[in-house]
Image (cartoon, rainbow, N blue to C red):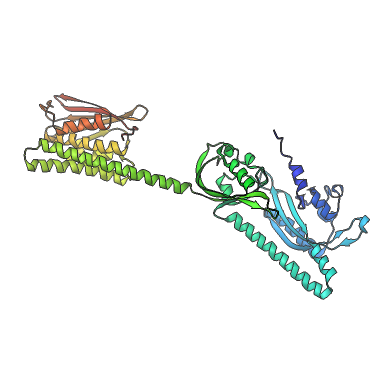
């Protein structure tokens, strides 16, 4: 079991020179590479102002001071591609000042409030170029060569910054992992967005993304590093914690693990590049579901039309009565289909279905009392036919055949998963129990108890017909 990471030791072992200043430009820390570069001990720099430790005047000091102040005051990274800055030689090396050429980057480090607390300087001594120029050539030729070398160095630095900017802004997610523990060296913006903007640089994958440890990805990275063969994944499912404390979120990725091969043939790390395909996968799944659902609904609709035709034909006495009854029932089915189409078959409102079926009889004769209820598509289709048959019966023999009214009352029970409905006719003739069960009665019963797996009862009284039924809303009716 490993102990906590010693970031102080890591900072000191970084091969590039780094040092840290406070807001007053006083030394807070410096790594060993920096101390070697400036040929000073930490005791000579600790808590000293950089311009006291390395005095300078004129344009050189102004350039450095402006860059540091900009990073501190604006909270922005600043760069000095090339700056001449003389530093004092140690006494054992003869003393005096030696002109050197540097390349430096200043990165603001904010506190909890977002105010810059420290400034991190990464610096490189490029004086060797100037010394090579002086040793190899005369002053004019050397100056020309030196200027060209420096110009090329500056061009390379500019190109490097541009490449880094392209890497960070690339639309595909990218990361560079180093060593056998797969430590994050770089991760671009798309990658950090994918993992919930976690800070992962300098951390092993196991520490940075603990939720993927048991999902097989670290084994894949180990294999790529050992075999030096790339791995390509297509629509690979991964569970990521994209918000602190939140549940794991399922994503689908196209990605490649590419080994980073060094000059000696060994693999030093893995380059990760890929695209989040989750939206496309979900769209494809929705399309397949819709096609399956459409196929199912077409079959159900054809079966319903077939049943309507057969039962209407049995009860019809003449071709004219068959045509009228069949057309009316198909129209009721069509109206419910229109309501479902408007909602892309996501269902329809109970009131909407009732208004469509009962509107022709006059809104003043219909009293509705109940909450807004959203009906699943299959329930809406079946109840649309039920209400059509009940309204047709009321118009022929019940309250709507005279000056009566319909009192419709409903509510949700069973935690909102069961619809309980009452159809009450009043102000019309007394209800008579039918001598034989016609198609309408059979359709109502088949719809409620068969297709919707609910319950229904009817009371035939002096004041009019009362029909009560209850159906589940959340069940999958196939």
Q: Which residue is drawn at 28% across and 41% down?
A: 297
Q: Is residue 66 above or below residue 405?
A: below
Horizontally, is 108 left or right of 140 in the view? Answer: left
Which sits in the foreground, 76 or 247?
A: 247
Horizontally, is 233 left or right of 130 in the view? Answer: left
Which sits in the foreground, 442 or 58?
A: 442
Quadrant in which the N terminus appears: top right
Q: Is residue 90 above or below residue 237?
A: below
Horizontally, is 388 left or right of 158 in the view? Answer: left
x, y percent for residue 397:
11, 32
The picture quadrant where one finds residue 445 is top left
x, y percent for residue 88:
87, 58
Is any part of residue 345 visible from this angle? no
Q: In this view, does 99 lie above or below 357?
A: below
x, y percent for residue 424:
20, 29
Is any part of residue 160 visible from this angle? yes
């Amino acid at each position: 079991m490993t102990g906590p990471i010693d970031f102080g030791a890591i900072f000191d072992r970084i091969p590039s020179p780094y040092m840290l200043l406070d807001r007053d430009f006083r030394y807070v820390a410096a790594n060993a590479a920096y101390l070697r570069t400036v040929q000073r001990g930490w005791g000579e720099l600790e808590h000293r102002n950089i311009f006291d430790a390395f005095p300078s005047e004129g344009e050189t000091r102004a350039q450095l001071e402006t860059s540091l102040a900009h990073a501190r005051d604006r909270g922005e990274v600043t760069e000095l591609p090339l700056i001449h800055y003389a530093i004092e030689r140690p006494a054992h090396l003869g003393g005096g000042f030696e002109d050197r050429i540097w390349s430096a980057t200043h990165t603001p480090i904010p506190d909890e409030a977002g105010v810059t607390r420290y400034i991190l300087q990464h610096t490189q001594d490029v004086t060797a170029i100037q010394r090579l120029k002086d040793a190899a050539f005369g002053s004019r030729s050397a100056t020309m060569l030196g200027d060209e070398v420096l110009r090329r160095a500056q061009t390379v630095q500019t190109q490097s910054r541009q490449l880094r900017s392209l890497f960070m802004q690339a639309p595909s997610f990218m990361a560079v992992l180093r060593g056998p523990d797969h430590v994050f060296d770089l991760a671009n913006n798309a990658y950090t967005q994918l993992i919930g903007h976690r800070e992962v640089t300098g951390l092993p994958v196991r520490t940075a993304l603990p939720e993927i440890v048991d999902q097989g990805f670290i084994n894949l990275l180990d294999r790529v590093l050992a075999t030096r063969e790339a791995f390509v994944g297509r629509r690979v499912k991964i569970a990521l914690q994209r918000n602190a404390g939140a549940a794991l979120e399922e994503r689908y990725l196209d990605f490649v693990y590419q080994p980073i091969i060094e000059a000696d043939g060994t693999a030093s790390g893995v380059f990760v590049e890929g695209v989040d395909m989750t939206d496309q996968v979900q769209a494809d799944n929705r399309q397949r579901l819709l096609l399956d659902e459409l196929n199912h609904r077409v079959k159900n609709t054809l079966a319903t039309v077939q049943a309507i035709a057969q039962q209407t034909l049995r009860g019809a006495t003449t071709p004219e009565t068959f045509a009228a009854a069949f057309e009316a029932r198909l129209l009721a089915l069509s109206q419910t289909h229109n309501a479902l189409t408007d909602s892309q078959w996501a269902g329809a409102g109970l009131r909407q279905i009732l208004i469509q079926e009962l509107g022709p009889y006059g809104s003043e004769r219909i009293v509705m009392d109940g909450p807004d209820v959203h009906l699943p598509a299959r329930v809406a289709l079946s109840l649309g036919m039920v209400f059509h048959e009940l309204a047709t019966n009321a118009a022929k023999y019940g309250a709507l055949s005279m000056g009566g009214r319909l009192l419709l009352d409903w509510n949700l029970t069973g935690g909102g998963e069961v619809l309980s409905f009452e159809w009450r006719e009043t102000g019309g003739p007394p209800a008579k129990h039918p001598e034989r069960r016609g198609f309408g009665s059979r359709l109502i019963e088949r719809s409620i108890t068969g297709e919707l797996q609910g319950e229904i009862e009817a009371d035939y009284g002096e004041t009019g017909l009362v029909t009560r039924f209850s159906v589940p809303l959340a069940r999958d009716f196939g």
